[in-house]
Image (cartoon, rainbow, N blue to C red):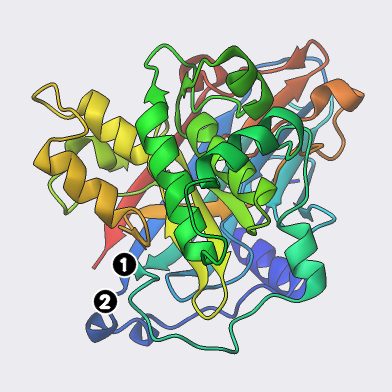
Amino acid sequence: MKISRRAFIQNTLGALALPSLYPFSSFAEGDNWKCYEITTELSIDAPNQPVQAWIPLPLSKDTDYFKTISIATDGDAKQASVFKTPTGDTRMLWGQWDASSSSRNLVSTFLIATRERNTLSRQFNQALILSKEEHAYWTHATEFLPTDGIVKEKVNQILKPLPKNASDIEKAKAIYNWVVENTYRDPATKGCGVGDVKLMLETNNLGGKCADINAVYVALARSAGIPARDVYGIRVDDSARGYKSLGRSADISKAQHCRAEFFAKGFGWVAVDPADVRKVILEEPGNLTLNDPKVIAIRDYLFGNWEMNWMPYNYGHDIALPGSKLGGKGKIPFLMYPQGETKEGRLDSLDPVNFKYKITSKRID
């Protein structure tokens, strides 16, 4: 049964109460919104066996910097549905084919809108607070984000020089500075890394990529009692700030990028990205150091701001893919890449050429 694009939009909207289709006039140029069409296409070559695939979908709730305009899909899956994790942090398109299927293709297209995010420049609002339940949720430990042991010891060392009455923003900035100054981007790391914070701190091997470096930030912040979370997503456009390493357009199949944020009373969720500071140091021309003006500028900018040439997928951690036959072994630390599974096991999500998936981005004027 081929999936109808129109039917899928209607069924998804009805079942999951996704946002109504926003008219483009809602994102007037004066509001600084930019619109993009993001398409994920995958094709799995596995004749005579059942197959499953999962495609990450955009952030489930609209924000002041990101909105989902529409979601549509196409393909020849025998069954296709939208699955949302029990916490609601992550949603995905789930396609299934049986052994009799002649091909296995799945396409998902999103229309989204983004605009620059400047969180610490807004006016203090005393009403911006988390409930006790929300605070507990965003400070809790997970398998890959421990908050005790060496993580607690390290954050205590980092915060020791601060006065006892230091604010959460001052603590978050101290943790940010420590991560920027003590981690490094390792080009040999596959994909975006895995974010095994405990292993990184125990071995004092603080190299990795965005999912490693920003996970260290989130775990340290949570250990200090500051609500924090990773935000998994993908770059959708070139950077307008003059950094070649901080953007990607057209074919964005390998442009996945994890960011982070912490919650500060009166300001809400505050954008940070220490991993991209280390990316600039490694990848921008000129053998840059922490003292280079370009690095100082982006380091200052990425505490409180995000350039929104990037689309968020979710906040999810330690995810069990629905329907997976791998049981506990099939759990993934995060969902930023398309996933596929045959009776022979999980496909390599970091290998779009052999997995045969492609993600593209197009600016809609």
The residue lying toward the viewer, choosing from 15 and 331, is 331
Of helix, strand and loop, which one carries label 1? loop
Q: Hey, which quadrant is residue 199 in on the image? A: top right
Find residue 209 and report its horizontal and vertical position in percent. 45, 27
Q: Inspect the image, locate mark 2, and give the three-letter code of the amino acid beneath it.
A: Asn
Of helix, strand and loop, which one carries label 2? loop
User: On the image, numbered disc 1 is attached to which residue?
Assistant: 116
Mark 1 and mark 2 in contact? Answer it, CB < 8 Å.
yes
Please tell me how crowded label 2 is: few (under 14), some (14-19), or many (20+) other residues with Cα within 10 Å.
few
The residue located at (63%, 58%) in the rendering is 226
Q: Is residue 30 left or right of residue 270?
A: left
- Tell me if residue 186 can be seen: yes
The quadrant of the rendering that contains the C terminus is: bottom left
The residue lying toward the viewer, choosing from 248 and 217, is 217
Q: Is residue 349 left or right of residue 300?
A: right
- Of tags 1 and 2, the one toward the viewer is 1
The residue lying toward the viewer, choosing from 256 and 24, is 256
Looking at the image, is mark 1 or mark 2 earlier in the sequence?
A: 2
Q: As displayed, is residue 203 above or below residue 306? A: above
User: On the image, numbered disc 2 is attached to which residue?
Assistant: 32
Question: How far, Cα to Cα, is label 1 from label 2?
Answer: 8 Å
Q: Is residue 274 left or right of residue 9?
A: left
Q: As displayed, is residue 163 above or below residue 76? A: below
The residue located at (78%, 59%) in the rendering is 137
The residue located at (63%, 52%) in the rendering is 315
Find residue 260 and report its horizontal and vertical position in percent. 51, 50
The residue located at (77%, 39%) in the rendering is 319
The tag on residue 361 is: none
Please tell me how crowded label 1 is: few (under 14), some (14-19), or many (20+) other residues with Cα within 10 Å.
some
